[in-house]
């Protein structure tokens, strides 16, 4: 029901190819991360999924139905945009009631509980909210909508560390309680890494990779040690990034290393550590940029 | 949830968003009309003391609602993943409801002030078509005129919404260009026989005087349908972002 499939999607804005032949599937009942640098095409892709803008080519299907032809299918999707689409004159309560009108599954008491947790006064108007509280309100609407698919574009934009932490906890709680598919687009990778089950990295409008976070983390290593030894060891391997530190060097390896190789490395005095999702992301996107140039 | 339910809910949302503006406007318009009617009341004995209600302010108001009452409501509907076709039908229905309401208020307030002040009420249509304003045929005519104003405003807004920077500039300049061309006609630069003063007033004089009220209503309704069709074409592919 909540499988999202994109086939051959392209979108061009004047001279910029924002999305370039993207085919990707978001499996149901998982938390997906859509990661990318600023201007990578994350929001454009999410807007296309939600039929907010139209692709130049390609199709988007949700639960097997095309979003172009089946107008009701998007009623199962709540899309929290980074840009504010709500007029300043609307009160939060008014918007929440509208949300209840259009998403009958909306749980108003859940929304009020969340508002209390975030210390958000629901009697306020949109125009009176700071950018952080605006993000909180949009996230509250999304979480209490109980839609089958939640798409959150930069949900923690403008939030302080405490609120970010609280929001991540609430997203997890919502996910644990309901069978939802959640797509989170963000560039705050380190914080969100523990939340995600699957990750898709987009760069220059192209999907660089899509795979489960766990298997991705298994693939990447940071090898540190004497420069010449590191270079010798990584000679025939795929390296994403090398950082010289005096006589030493730190290299981000991308690919499987078997136990034998690991032992050989250790024997010659190299140190091995698992790379974080953020490091892999930076390595992959920088690498692509360099290849692009 | 079916489509009819969506349309009803979206219409309610649109009307809720407009209700304060309409309330404030009507309050001011009716108050000013009452003030004028009662202040000219002492001159009844001098003869030829009449009032023509709030038709003209209503036309201007509904045109402004057409222009301003789209963007925010469309954005909110879009944020709730409401289909564009559903929004179009809901917006159009809301305009019809407001227009019917304003037409009734227009007639009702005019007659009410006549009753209490003694100042005769002559509706715009009455002056043009030489018929009595208690004739119910006036209502569809007023509604058609209001809808013409409302949909023209909406169409202008839609054109701006879909236009790129250059197109927006051309749209903004178009009244100036049109006036310039009409001026050229007026000076007789284009044709000695066809002058500016002949065209616009001539068009309306022909529409309103030479046709009867029913035909005029049909003609304005046809323009309304064309406006709505163009709005639909523009909204079908309108981005929500």
Image (spheres, coloured by chain):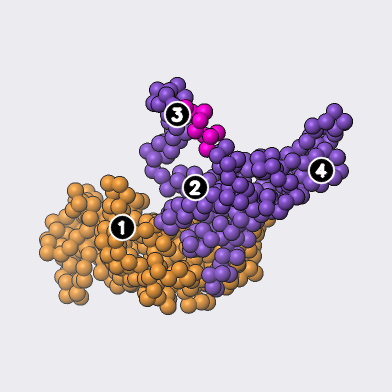
Chain colours: A orange, B purple
Q: Chain of mark 4?
A: B
**The magenta stretch spans which residues?**
B194-203
Could you tell me if the residues under marks 2 and 1 are in contact, i.e. CB atoms within 8 Å? no
- Bin the neighbour count of mark 3 within 10 Å (Cα to Cα): few under 14, some 14-19, many 20 and up: some
Q: Disc 3 and disc 1: Cα gap in Å?
A: 47 Å
Q: Nearer the viewer, residue A223 or A87?
A: A87
* Residue in the picture at 60% in, 54% down: B95
Q: Nearer the viewer, residue A2 or A253?
A: A2
Q: Disc 4 and disc 2: Cα gap in Å?
A: 35 Å
Residues marked 4 and 3, same chain: yes
Q: To which residue does mark 1 refer?
A: A56
Q: Which mark is residue A176?
A: none
Left or right of B63, for residue B233: left
Q: Disc 3 and disc 2: Cα gap in Å?
A: 29 Å
Q: To which residue does mark 3 refer?
A: B194
Q: Nearer the viewer, mark 4 or mark 3?
A: 3
Q: Nearer the viewer, residue A142 or A233?
A: A142
């Amino acid at each position: 029901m909540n499988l999202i499939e994109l086939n051959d999607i392209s979108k061009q804005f004047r001279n910029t190819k924002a999305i370039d032949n993207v085919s990707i599937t978001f499996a149901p009942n998982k938390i997906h991360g859509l990661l990318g640098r600023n201007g990578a095409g994350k929001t454009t892709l999410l807007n296309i999924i939600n039929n907010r803008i139209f692709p130049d080519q390609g199709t988007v299907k949700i639960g097997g139905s095309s979003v172009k032809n089946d107008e009701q299918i998007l009623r199962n999707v709540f899309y929290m945009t980074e840009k504010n689409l709500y007029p300043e004159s609307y009160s939060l309560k008014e918007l929440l009631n509208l949300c209840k009108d259009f998403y009958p599954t909306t749980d108003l008491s859940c929304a009020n509980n969340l508002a209390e947790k975030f210390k958000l006064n629901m009697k306020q108007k949109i125009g009176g909210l700071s950018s952080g509280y605006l993000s909180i309100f949009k996230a509250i609407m999304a979480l209490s909508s109980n839609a089958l698919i939640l798409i959150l574009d930069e949900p923690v934009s403008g939030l302080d560390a405490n609120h970010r932490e609280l929001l991540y906890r609430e997203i997890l709680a919502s996910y644990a309680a309901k069978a939802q598919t959640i797509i989170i687009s963000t560039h705050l990778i380190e914080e969100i890494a523990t939340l995600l089950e699957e990750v898709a990295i987009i760069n220059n409008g192209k999907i660089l990779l899509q795979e489960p976070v766990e298997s991705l983390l298994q693939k990447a290593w940071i090898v540190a040690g004497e420069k010449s030894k590191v270079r010798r060891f990584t000679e025939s391997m795929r390296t994403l990034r090398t950082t010289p530190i005096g006589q030493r060097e730190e290299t981000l390896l991308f690919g499987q290393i078997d136990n034998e190789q690991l032992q050989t490395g250790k024997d010659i005095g190299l140190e091995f550590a698992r790379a974080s999702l953020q490091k892999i992301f930076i390595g992959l996107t920088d690498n692509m940029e360099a290849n692009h140039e | 949830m079916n489509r009819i339910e969506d349309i009803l809910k979206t219409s309610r949302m649109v009307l809720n968003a407009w209700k304060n503006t309409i309330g404030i406007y009507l309050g001011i318009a009716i108050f000013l009309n009452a003030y004028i009617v009662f202040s000219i009341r002492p001159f009844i004995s001098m003869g030829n003391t009449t009032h023509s209600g709030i038709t003209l302010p209503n036309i201007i108001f509904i045109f402004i609602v057409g222009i301003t009452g789209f963007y925010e409501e469309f954005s909110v509907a879009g944020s709730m993943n409401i289909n564009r076709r559903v929004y179009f039908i809901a917006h159009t229905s809301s305009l019809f409801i407001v227009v019917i309401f304003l037409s009734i208020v227009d007639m009702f307030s005019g007659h009410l002030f006549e009753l209490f002040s003694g100042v005769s009420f002559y509706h715009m249509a009455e002056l043009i078509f030489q018929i009595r304003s208690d004739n119910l045929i006036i209502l569809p005519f007023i509604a058609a005129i209001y809808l013409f104003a409302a949909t023209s405003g909406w169409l202008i807004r839609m054109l701006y919404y879909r236009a790129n920077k250059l197109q927006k500039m051309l749209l903004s300049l178009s009244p100036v260009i049109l006036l310039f061309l009409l001026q050229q006609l007026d000076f007789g630069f284009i044709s000695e026989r066809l002058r500016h003063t002949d065209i616009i007033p001539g068009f309306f004089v022909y529409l309103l005087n030479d046709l009867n009220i029913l035909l005029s209503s049909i003609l304005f309704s046809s323009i309304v349908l064309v406006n709505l069709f163009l709005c639909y074409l523009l909204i079908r592919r309108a981005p929500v972002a």
